[in-house]
Every structure is written in structure tokens, then in C-alpha cells.
């Protein structure tokens, strides 16, 4: 015989209400953590982008009289940092895609997705700024290099000289 609402003991109803409310609070805490985390990531990316843009502006206005990366170490480091930012963008996109799964529903998905999208766009702008800065440094240093007055008689001499770089 199936139980009717009147035949369910009050302590079981109470336990069900408690369990449901604990799940709801856990879910809302998860939503808040996702939104807060993505917002912090966005803010950090925007701060980093702003700092890069300031250095880029100084560089483009001739603020440096000496080469900034004569050994190429900074450019190598920049390429590595750009790769890390690209990985972060991929991870954020995967996270955002996961929000479309069955584990999430309702109005909270939009808040989490909006915050994720904001972080993704901020990291994309950061990556672009990093690439712009790296190229600006390379161009700046190239402009300051003294031209070599080497004259090559043959292509083989040129290739041999290039191998010595």
C-alpha cells in the first residue's frame, strides 16, 4: 500500500526538508564560488593587461634608449607566458561549456556563464596585449641594433654566417 502524505512520519518529512535545504545551500555556495572565482580571474587579467598597456605606451613613445632584450630571453619567457594564458582560456572555455550540462540549471547558470565569459574575454585581451608587447620589444631592439657591414660574395658565405648566430 503506497504511503500518502498523511501516513509519512513527521521526522522523515523533517529530514527530507533539511536535506533539501542543505543541498540548496551547497548549490548556492557553489554558484557563488564559481562567480567569485571567475570574477577574480577577470580582475587579475584586466590588471595585468593594464600594466602591459602602460609599458607598451612608454615603449611606443620612445621611452627606452637601450635594447630591452638583447639576448632574447625576455621574448622566450613571453612566449611561455602567452602559452600559459592560452591554456587558461581553454580551461575557462571548458568550464563554461560544463555549465550547459545536466548538473546546473536555472537562473544561476546565467550568472556563472556571464562571469566565465567575462574572464575568458579578459584573458583573450591579456594574451593579445602580451603578444603586442613582445613584438614591440623585438621591433624596438631591432631598431637600435647597429647594422653589420658584412658583404658576402656567395650564398654559402651568407648561410655560414647565419649558422653562427
Image: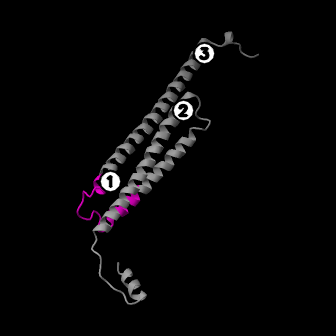
Q: Which mark is residue 13?
A: 3
Q: Residue furthest right?
A: 1
> Whole-percent x and y of residue 92?
49, 45
Where is residue 35? Give x, y as percent: 46, 34
Q: CA distance from mark 3 to mark 1?
A: 64 Å
* Residue 77 x/y as whole percent: 36, 60
* Foreground pick, 25 / 137: 137
**Magenta run includes residue 94:** no
Q: Nearer the viewer, mark 2 or mark 1?
A: 1
- Residue 24 in the image: state x and y as whole percent: 53, 25
The answer to which of marks 2 and 1 sits earlier in the sequence is 1
Read off the residue under disc 1.
Answer: 56
In the image, taking residue 106 as reference, residue 61 lies left or right, namely left
Label located before the other in sequence (3 or 2): 3
Q: Is residue 36 above or below residue 125?
A: above
Earlier-in-chain disc, 3 versus 1: 3
| Residue at the (35%, 81%) spot, across then down | 164
* Local SS, label 1: helix
The residue stretch that appears in magenta: 56-81
Disc 3: CA contacts within 10 A as few (<14), some (14-19) or many (>=20): few
For the rendered model, the colour scheme is one colour
What number is the disc on residue 43? none
Quadrant location, the N terminus: top right
Amino acid at each position: 500500500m503506497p504511503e500518502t502524505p498523511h501516513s509519512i512520519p513527521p521526522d522523515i518529512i523533517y529530514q527530507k526538508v533539511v536535506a533539501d535545504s542543505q543541498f540548496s545551500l551547497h548549490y548556492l555556495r557553489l554558484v557563488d564560488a564559481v562567480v567569485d572565482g571567475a570574477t577574480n580571474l577577470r580582475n587579475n587579467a584586466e590588471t595585468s593587461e593594464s600594466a602591459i598597456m602602460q609599458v607598451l605606451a612608454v615603449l611606443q613613445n620612445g621611452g627606452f634608449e637601450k635594447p630591452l632584450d638583447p639576448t632574447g630571453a625576455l621574448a622566450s619567457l613571453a612566449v611561455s607566458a602567452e602559452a600559459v594564458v592560452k591554456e587558461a582560456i581553454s580551461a575557462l572555455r571548458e568550464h563554461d561549456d560544463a555549465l550547459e550540462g545536466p548538473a546546473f540549471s536555472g537562473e544561476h547558470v546565467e550568472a556563472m556563464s556571464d562571469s566565465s565569459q567575462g574572464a575568458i574575454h579578459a584573458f583573450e585581451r591579456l594574451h593579445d596585449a602580451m603578444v603586442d608587447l613582445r613584438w614591440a620589444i623585438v621591433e624596438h631592439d631591432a631598431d637600435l641594433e647597429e647594422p653589420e657591414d658584412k658583404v658576402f660574395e656567395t650564398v654559402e658565405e651568407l648561410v655560414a654566417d647565419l649558422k653562427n648566430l
